[in-house]
C-alpha cells in the first residue's frame, strides 16, 4: 500500500512538472507572464467617434468625413493647426451626428466649391447663415485637406495602416497658410524631414510663424494653392 501511494504521488508530481514546462497553446496565450495576448495578437484601434480626441501626444488626430465617402485623417495635429481649424485645443470634440439632414444636404455643395473661402465666407451661404453645427460639419472636410490630411477609402482601411511600420521613404508633408494668400508646402520623406530638421515646425506659435519655418527648411510657396500637386483641394 505504501509503495502504491508513493507511486501515485510521484506520477502526480511528474504530471504537474510537465504541465509547467510544456503549457498548452491556450495556456501560453492567456496565463504565461512572458507572453501577453496584446503582444501575440495586435488589436486594431476602436471605431472613430471623435473629430478630435487627445491621447498621449505629441499632437492629436483630426478626422473629417467628406460627402464623397471615406475619411480624412490629419495626424500629429498641433495647437496652431487646431486654431486654424477652429477646434478646441483642450477638449475632445465629438463626431457630428449623421442624422443631421441639413448637414447632409448642404455638405456636397460646400465640399465641391471651386474656390477656397475663409470660414467667415463659408458661414454665409446663398444669403442665409448656417447653424454653427452645420457649418462645422461642412467646413472641416474642406479645411482639413488644406493641412495635408490623408484620405482613406474607409475607416477599416485606415485602421489596418496602424499595423504597418513606418519606413524612411514614407511621405512627410507640412502646410502653412499665410494671411496674404497662397500656401507654403514642405513635401518630403520621413528621412528627408529628419535631415532638414523639420521637427522645428512644431515649435511655431502661430500660422504666420509656421509659414516662415516651412520656408526656412526648404518648403515651396504656391501663389495659387491649386497649383500644389500634394494637396487634395476641392
Image (spheres, rainbow, N blue to C red):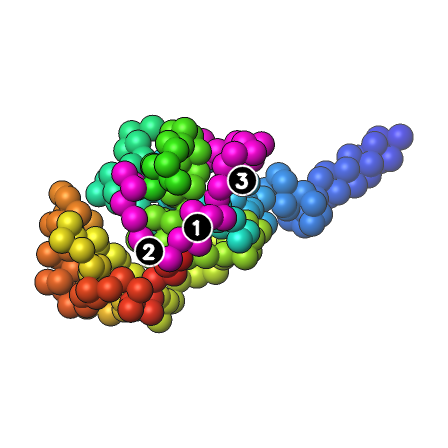
Q: Residues within 10 Å of mark 1 (few under 14, many from 20)?
A: many
Q: Is residue 76 magenta?
A: no
Q: Residue at x 29, y 69 (%)?
A: 227
Find the magenta span and give its range. 92-121
Q: Residue at x 13, y 53 (%)?
A: 180
Q: Residues within 10 Å of mark 2 (few under 14, many from 20)?
A: few
Q: Comparing marks 1 and 2, which lies closer to the viewer?
A: 2
Q: Residue at x 16, y 59 (%)?
A: 214
On screen, residue 193 versus residue 51, left or right, reads left
- Residue 81 image point, x, y percent: 26, 45
- Residue 177 image point, x, y percent: 21, 53
Element type where label 1 sits in the image: helix
Find residue 88 and report its image quarter: top left
Element type where label 2 sits in the image: loop
Q: Is residue 2 visible?
A: yes
Element type where label 3 sits in the image: helix
Tell which of 174 and 101 is nearer to you.
Answer: 101
On screen, residue 15 versus residue 35, left or right, reads right
Q: Of the residues under marks 3 and 1, which one precedes in the sequence? A: 3
Labels 3 and 1 touching (C-beta < 8 A): no
Q: Residue at x 25, y 43 (%)?
A: 84
Q: Which residue is mark 1?
A: 111
Q: Residues within 10 Å of mark 3 (few under 14, many from 20)?
A: some
Is residue 123 positioned above or below 156 on the image? above
Q: CA distance from mark 3 to mark 1?
A: 11 Å
Q: Which residue is mark 3?
A: 104
Q: Which residue is mark 2?
A: 115
Amino acid at each position: 500500500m505504501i509503495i502504491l501511494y508513493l507511486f501515485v504521488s510521484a506520477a502526480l508530481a511528474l504530471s504537474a512538472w510537465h504541465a509547467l514546462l510544456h503549457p498548452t497553446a491556450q495556456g501560453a496565450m492567456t496565463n504565461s507572464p512572458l507572453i501577453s495576448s496584446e503582444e501575440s495578437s495586435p488589436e486594431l484601434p476602436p471605431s472613430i467617434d471623435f473629430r478630435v480626441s487627445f491621447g498621449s501626444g505629441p499632437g492629436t488626430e483630426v478626422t473629417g468625413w467628406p460627402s464623397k465617402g471615406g475619411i480624412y485623417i490629419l495626424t500629429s495635429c498641433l495647437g496652431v493647426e487646431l486654431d486654424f481649424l477652429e477646434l478646441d485645443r483642450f477638449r475632445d470634440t465629438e463626431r457630428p451626428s449623421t442624422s443631421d439632414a441639413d448637414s447632409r444636404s448642404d455638405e456636397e455643395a460646400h465640399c465641391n466649391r471651386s474656390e477656397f473661402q475663409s470660414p467667415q465666407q463659408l458661414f454665409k451661404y446663398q444669403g442665409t447663415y448656417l447653424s454653427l453645427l452645420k457649418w462645422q460639419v461642412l467646413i472641416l472636410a474642406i479645411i482639413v485637406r488644406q493641412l495635408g490630411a490623408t484620405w482613406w477609402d474607409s475607416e477599416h482601411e485606415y485602421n489596418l495602416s496602424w499595423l504597418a511600420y513606418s519606413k524612411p521613404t514614407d511621405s512627410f508633408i507640412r502646410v502653412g497658410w499665410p494671411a496674404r494668400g497662397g500656401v507654403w508646402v514642405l513635401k518630403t520623406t520621413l528621412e528627408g524631414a529628419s535631415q532638414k530638421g523639420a521637427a522645428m515646425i512644431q515649435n511655431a506659435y502661430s500660422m504666420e510663424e509656421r509659414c516662415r519655418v516651412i520656408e526656412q527648411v526648404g518648403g515651396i510657396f504656391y501663389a495659387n494653392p491649386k497649383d500644389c500637386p500634394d494637396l487634395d483641394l476641392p
